[in-house]
Structure formats: C-alpha cells, structure tokens
Amino acid sequence: MASPPPKQTMKERILETADKLFYLQGIRAIGVDTIAAEIGISKRTLYNHFPSKDALIAAYLKGRFVQPRPSDKPPAEQILATFDSLERRFAAKDFRGCPFVNAVAELGPDDGDHSVKTIAIAFKESRRIWFRDLLQQLGVADPEALATQLVLLVDGSIAQDLVRDDPAMARAAREAARVLLINAGVELDKPDSPQAATRKKRPG
C-alpha cells in the first residue's frame, strides 16, 4: 500500500496560497492579511516564516523558476514543443501570462532593491540559454542570436494571447520558429510532423 503524501509544512502552505493568489489576482491586489486569512492563521504566524511581503514575493517567484525537464527528443523537436506547451497553457482558464513579467510590470519603481527584476531576468536568461544549448547541438551558425529571437517569439505569443484570448497565437509563433530554424540551416519535416529534425548536411 502506497504511503500517504507527507503533510505540508506551514511554510509550504503559505507559499502555495501566495502563489495562487499572487498569480491569479495580482501581487499588488493581495496583501499578507488576505493570505493569512485564506489559510486561517495570524499575520504573526505568516511573518514567522516570511519576514515581509517582499520576502514572500521573492519566494513565490523562485518557486516558479522551474527548469525544463531533460529530454531524449531531437533538439529541434524540443524547441518546437515549447510552443505546443504554450498553446495548451493558453487554453487553460487559469492562465494569466508570465508571472515574472507580471511581477516586474506590477511592482516597477516599488521594487526598491531590484530583487524581483533580478529574479525575472535570471529566469528569462535561463530559458534563452536552454534554447541556445539546443541550437548548439544543431550546429547553427549563431545560436546566441537565434536563441534570443526564439524567446522573443515565446514572450510575444504570451502577450498576444492575453490581449486576444486566442491560444492559436502559440501556433503562429511555432510557425515563425520553424522559419527561423529552416533559415538557420536546420532541416525539418513537414509542418504537422515535427519528428526527426536534423541539421542539414552541407557539401564538402
């Protein structure tokens, strides 16, 4: 018989509640009073685990800082699958955009020590480096520049979906990514079959 899942600690409960409320309703809109009331604890208990709202915001964003899972799929297939995942995410009722962009946009000048912006930059750069490493495996001439273009497609599709409420924006970004890959010399199968993408063989 499987063991029951371990009981959440109070710190985990606070962070889980903050994650849900910050993402769905906004960081500015949600105070520590609301988070404490949602859990049924006092503000003092919350502050015993997170000394300030700023500390809780930083922990929330760090909790969202999840690296892509390792995969045995071909590099180009992994790149294009990013946009397939985005399309599924866009279709979810609880999708509210990128939490890192949202946090920077909400806090702006109030991010006194720039901790939120620092975390957001680190996340965005980690995604760019992930693209770059896959592009290096494909042997493209300028993986740094192409990786930057791909993250722009990701962020652009997120913005378009938020405005239009249309998951097909991810599909359009995927097609643009295909064009970029092909122009960089990556050989891809026909559009609806992203299997077995490989680097073009050059003469000589």
Image (cartoon, rainbow, N blue to C red):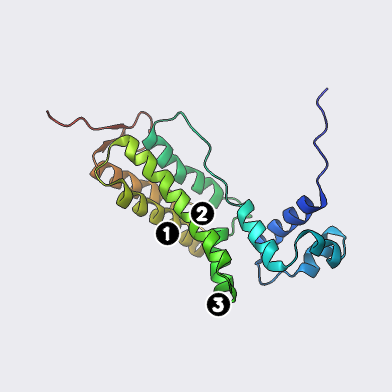
Q: Position of residue 167 (x, y in %)?
A: 49, 52
Most extreme residue toward the bottom is: 109
Mark with earlier residue (2, 3): 3
Pointer 2 local density, CA inside 10 Å: few below 14, some 14–19, many at least 20: some
Q: Secondary structure at mark 3?
A: helix
Left or right position of 97 against 193: right
Most extreme residue toward the top is: 1
Q: Secondary structure at mark 1?
A: helix
Quickly name the residue at label 1.
Answer: 156
Hey, what amino acid is under mark 2? Answer: Phe
Q: Is residue 79 visible?
A: yes
Placement of 64 over or under 107, stated as above or below: above
Report the quarter where the C terminus lies: top left
Q: For the point 51% across and 54% down, which residue is it? A: 123
Hey, what amino acid is under mark 3? Answer: Pro
* Marks 1,2: beta carbons within 8 A: no
Q: Position of residue 16 (x, y in %)?
A: 73, 53
Quickly name the residue at label 3.
Answer: 109
Q: For the point 31% across and 36% down, which residue is it? A: 138
Q: Which label lies toward us, 1 or 2?
A: 2
Placement of 55 over or under 167, stated as above or below: below
Hey, what amino acid is under mark 1? Answer: Gly
Quickly name the residue at label 2.
Answer: 123
Residue nearer the viewer, 13 or 158: 13
